[in-house]
Each structure stands twice: as structure tokens, then as C-alpha cells.
Image (spheres, rainbow, N blue to C red):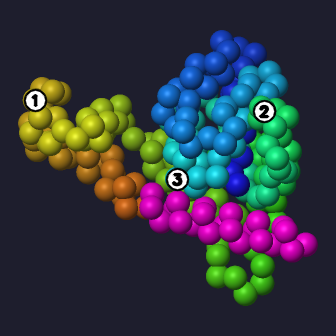
Amino acid sequence: MFVITADQIDSRNDRDRASEMIARLNADFGPAFLLPPDQTSGDEIQLLTADADAALNVVLALHRAGHWSIGLGIGDVRTPLPASTRQASGGAFVAARDAVNRSKRTEARFALEAAATVPPGDPTPAADEVEAIVTMLLLLRQRRTNEGWEAIELLRRGLPQVQIAAALGISTAAVSQRLKSAQWRVEEAVRPALVKLVQNLDRATTESERDA
């Protein structure tokens, strides 16, 4: 299971962004949530999913928004699930709490914690190794220009580069250069591998936690 806890950065000097972010996450990823995003305390958001792809996408969305310290906790969750996220408990929730606290001291404002270690002999990378790879992707995206994001978002809507060029009022060569500078092919290539790593870490650590 995957628990994501996100704490708004510098909330004392900023407006409350939790409600707006919760609405966006529900609109984009709602069906994947076992427990939907909830404002658990102050300006903090917490949610639960069993879908590794959704977990990674939520982390990317929160990071792109630019206002959140993000903790991803992986592990078991106590069942039956309660009616709301704030009532839930289990190893993944403890791990997410530890992760979000540590994320505030990292360059990417992201940290990943697992509720248990990978069993000896299991080839699955450890939590800190998976965190390092996710962090690399986050920092790559963080350095992307607004022009790069603009081209990528149109591309992801299914527009060919000729139409993107027309929409942006630039040449197709300029579109190609923007996409290259934004390293969108790198991100598209690494995402499936990252999902698999996160999924395998969940499997390995959950088995270890249950055997303990």
C-alpha cells in the first residue's frame, strides 16, 4: 500500500492550498484512491492507494505544484479500512509521516520510507535507492522551463508537433528543441521503470512486515 502525506510549505505566510490541491488530485486520479485525499491537520494532505502508478503520479503532481513537502510511505495498512484517511493506521501511515518530516530537509522536498526492510536475498532495491531515483526525476522536472512544460502538455494531449508549433506560434524545429531541452523522452522512458521499482518495493517490504 502507498500512503502519501504532503505538508504545505510556509503555510503561515501563504493561503491555504489544501482544498484546491485535493480537488485537483480527485479530478485527476480519484478512481485509484482507496481512501481519497483528506486535510488531516493544518495544511496537510494525506491519501491512500494500492496503485504504484497512481502513487508516482500524485507525487509528480504535488511536486509540480511547487507548494508541498511530500512523503511517500510504503507498507501494510490496517483493515478493514475506515471511512476517512484521517482514521486509518498501519505501517504505511507511520512511514509516510517519517518521510514527510524528512522531506523538508531534502533538495527536492521529497522522501520515501518503507515500513519494513527488503528481505535478505530479495533483489528489490532498498527504499533509499528508490528514493534517489525518484529524486533525480523530480529535480529534472524542477529545472524544466515554462516553455518546455507548455510543449510537453500539448504533446501529452495527443497533438503532433506541427499542431503544437501552430498553437504556440513557433516553428516545428523550435518545438523539437523545447522537448529536447525539457528531456521529456527521458521522463517517458524512466516512468514505467520507476513504477515497477515502487511496486516491487511495496511487495517486498509488505511481505517482510507480515513475516516479522
Residue 67 percent location from the top left of the image: 61, 28
Q: Which residue is mark 1?
A: 166
Q: Which residue is mark 3?
A: 53
User: Is residue 39 placed above or below 141 in the rendered structure?
Assistant: above
In front here: 82 or 65? 82
Magenta highlight on residue 128: no
Please give left or right for residue 212 compared with residue 194 in the image: right
Which residues, given as a range, are shown in magenta? 191-212
**Secondary structure state at the residue bearing disc 3:** helix
Earlier-in-chain disc, 3 versus 1? 3
Query: CA gap, disc 3 to disc 1?
Result: 32 Å
In the displayed image of the protein, which residue is found farthest to the front? Answer: 80
Instruction: Check whether the beta carbons of the residues at disc 2 and disc 1 lie within 8 A of each other.
Output: no
Instruction: Check whether the beta carbons of the residues at disc 3 and disc 2 lie within 8 A of each other.
Output: no
Q: Which residue is mark 2?
A: 83
Q: Amino acid at mark 3?
A: Asp
The answer to whether any part of residue 194 appears in the image is yes
The rendered magenta stretch, by its main secondary structure, is classed as helix
Query: CA gap, disc 2 to disc 1?
Result: 48 Å
Q: Amino acid at mark 2?
A: Ala
Residue 97, quarter of picture: top right
Question: Looking at the image, which residue is at 57% across and 23% down?
Answer: 23
Q: Amino acid at mark 1?
A: Ala
